[in-house]
């Protein structure tokens, strides 16, 4: 069911933009939020700002996210709709929160270049490249959400990102005009 809690429908949909680090989640999500006047939430930034973590992982050079704290922090915000969430994981968010789950995918050579420019190396670099090769995030999304709301989108170039923002903006407009359910129902 599109829309939310207790059988009621939000006035605006919520979207999750997910994918391996370096696939363009933040660029896509922030551009989409600007185009639609939706609220943009980067979970990684939220975790740092609100200390929603259980410390630092030296091997992967990142915070260990506390999923329960993140969900508690977002619960009321998500209920109202009109939110675009950006995070490289998706299996811990409640299914009811999202009306569209977008999995960004990038060719391995493009991803490698993006990640090395960010300073990724060693285990962190190889794990993220392998994650993309084996489509781990797409599989996670398909296992966690209804098939009809999960869409993979290519994100290799600035043109891809612009096209993705345009098609998602159009989807949002259609969803809002549908009145009940989502455009896919």
Image (cartoon, helix red, strand yellow):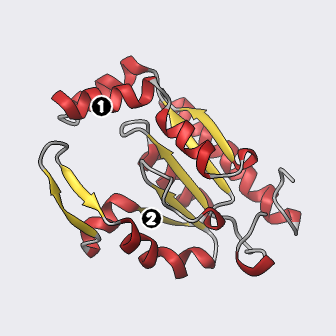
Where 173 sits versus 103, above or below? below
The residue carrying pointer 2 sits among few (fewer than 14), some (14 to 19) or many (20 or more) residues within 10 Å by Cα, namely some
Residue labelled with disc 2: 41
The residue carrying pointer 1 sits among few (fewer than 14), some (14 to 19) or many (20 or more) residues within 10 Å by Cα, namely some
Could you say which quadrant of the image residue 20 lies in?
top left
| SS type, badge 1 | helix
Could you say which quadrant of the image residue 153 lies in?
top right
Q: Nearer the viewer, residue 58 or 161?
A: 58
Please report whichever mark, 1 or 2, sits nearer to the chain's N-terminal start: 2
Seen as rendered, the residue at the extreme front is: 143
Which residue does the image show at 69% across and 59% down from the upper left?
99
| SS type, badge 2 | strand
Which residue does the image show at 57% across and 45% down from the upper left?
141
Where 59 sits versus 82, above or below? above
Where 171 sits versus 157, above or below? below
Mark carried by residue 127: 1
Image position, residue 122 (x, y; %): 16, 28
Which residue does the image show at 33% across and 32% down from the upper left?
128
Could you say which quadrant of the image residue 123 lies in?
top left
Judge left or right: residue 63 versus residue 76.
Answer: left
Per the model, the C-alpha gap separating discs 1 and 2 is 25 Å
Image position, residue 118 (x, y; %): 22, 36
Which residue does the image show at 24% across and 72% down from the upper left?
51
């Amino acid at each position: 069911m599109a829309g939310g809690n207790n059988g009621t429908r939000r006035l605006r949909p919520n979207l999750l933009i997910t994918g391996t680090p370096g696939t363009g989640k933040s660029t896509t999500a922030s551009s989409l939020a600007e185009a639609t006047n939706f609220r943009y939430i980067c979970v990684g930034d939220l975790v740092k700002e609100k200390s929603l973590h259980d410390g630092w992982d030296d091997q992967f050079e990142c915070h260990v996210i506390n999923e329960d704290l993140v969900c508690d922090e977002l619960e009321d915000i998500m209920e109202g709709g009109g939110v675009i969430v950006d995070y490289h994981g998706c299996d811990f968010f409640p299914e009811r929160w999202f009306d569209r789950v977008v999995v960004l995918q990038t060719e391995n050579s493009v991803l490698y270049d993006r990640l090395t420019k960010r300073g990724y190396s060693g285990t962190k670099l190889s794990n993220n490249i392998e994650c993309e090769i084996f489509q781990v995030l797409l599989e996670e999304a398909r296992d966690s959400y209804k098939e009809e709301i999960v869409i993979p989108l290519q994100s290799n170039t600035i043109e891809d990102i612009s096209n993705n923002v345009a098609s998602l903006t159009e989807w949002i407009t259609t969803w809002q005009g549908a009145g009940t359910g989502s455009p896919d129902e």
